[in-house]
Image (spheres, grey):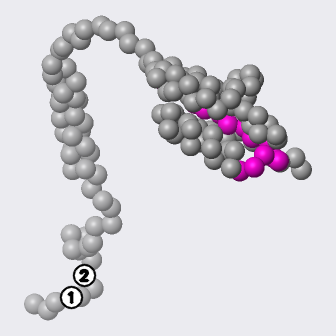
Amino acid sequence: MGMNTFSSDDDDGLMNEINMTPLVDVMLVLLIVFMVTIPVIRHAVKIELPHASSQKEDTKPAQIDVSIQADGTVLWDGAPVDSAALGAKIASAAQAAPQPVLRLSADRKVAYEKVAQLMSAAQRGGLAKIGFVTDPVKD
């Protein structure tokens, strides 16, 4: 009745391999479940949608070129204007829909006061979009 610690029983040894059968069974069950449920989800409700054609409106606002020369002369699209005519042109341009963009280009030697007066006249007339035109620096 002694216990032999060095017995050669094969039943008491540790299992060195993983049993893959339960893992394969679980994966096959999951595969079948997904194969059954995906078509049900995809075709749940059939709706016939109406057909409509719409295009994005891509209207760009007009551009008005206003230049101030070195002597203070104001040019509206290349034609010289005085201060009264400038105010009238700004007011009529502000009424357009969409509102045009005022592109302001001033000579390098013009006094800043002239540029500020033109910007103030554009604001009073109702033009909200003013862009400054410059030349790029040449290296």
Residue 34: quarter of image: top left
- In the image, the segment drawn in magenta is 98-112
Residue 36 appears at what percent x and percent y?
A: 18, 28
Residue 29 appears at what percent x and percent y?
A: 19, 39
Residue 42: quarter of image: top left
Residue position marked by numbered label 2 in the rendering = 7
The answer to whether residue 26 is magenta is: no
Residue 115 appears at what percent x and percent y?
A: 68, 44
Look at 77% across and 39% down and name the residue there.
72
Q: CA distance from mark 2 to mark 1?
A: 6 Å
Q: Work out which residue is located at the far left of the displayed protein and give it.
A: 1
Residue position marked by numbered label 1 in the rendering = 4
Q: How many marks?
A: 2
Near-viewer residue (97 or 27): 97
The answer to whether residue 107 is magenta is: yes
Whether the residues at callouts 2 and 1 have beta carbons within 8 Å, the answer is: yes
- Three-letter amino acid code of the residue under disc 2: Ser
Near-viewer residue (73 or 94): 73
Look at 52% across and 22% down and name the residue there.
92
Q: With respect to residue 18, does 45 lie above or below?
A: above
Q: With respect to residue 118, does 90 lie above or below?
A: above
**Residue 81 visible in the picture:** yes
Q: Is residue 60 left or right of residue 36?
A: right
